[in-house]
Image: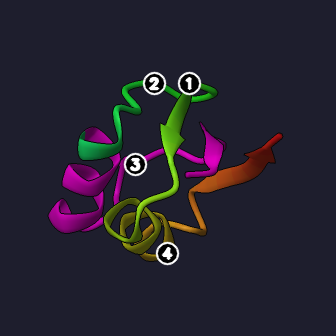
Amino acid sequence: MKKIKITQIKSGIDRSERQKLTLKALGLKKLHATKEVLATPQILGMVRKVDHLVKVEELA
């Protein structure tokens, strides 16, 4: 499986509760926090829901 690096670039403040919980489920707790995860369909779906708050990079 491919790995991706997810970085939170915008705040979760003043977002819906669902988006806040999605950020938490991805393991992003603070602004500019970075997490490396496997690119499973479940993770990619969560990233798609908060794509305006995160930056995604593919890892080799």
Task: Give whichever of 39, 17 is nearer the camera.
Answer: 39
- The span from disc 3 to disc 2 (Cα, nearest Å) is 9 Å
| Residue 22 in magenta stretch | yes
- The span from disc 1 to disc 4 (Cα, nearest Å) is 18 Å
* Residue at (63% x, 27% y) in the render: 32
* Residue at (34% x, 32% y) in the render: 27
56 vs 36, left or right, is right
Which residues, given as a range, are shown in magenta?
1-24
Tell me the tag on residue 33: 1
Task: Give whichever of 59, 24 is nearer the camera.
Answer: 59
Q: Position of residue 28 (x, y in %)?
A: 41, 33
Residue indicated by mark 2: 30
Residue indicated by mark 4: 48
Tell me the tag on residue 12: 3
Q: Nearer the viewer, mark 3 or mark 1?
A: 1
For badge 4, the amino acid type reads: Arg
Q: Are marks 2 and 1 in contact (CB under 8 Å)?
A: yes
Element at label 3? loop
Write down the quadrant of residue 16 in the picture: bottom left
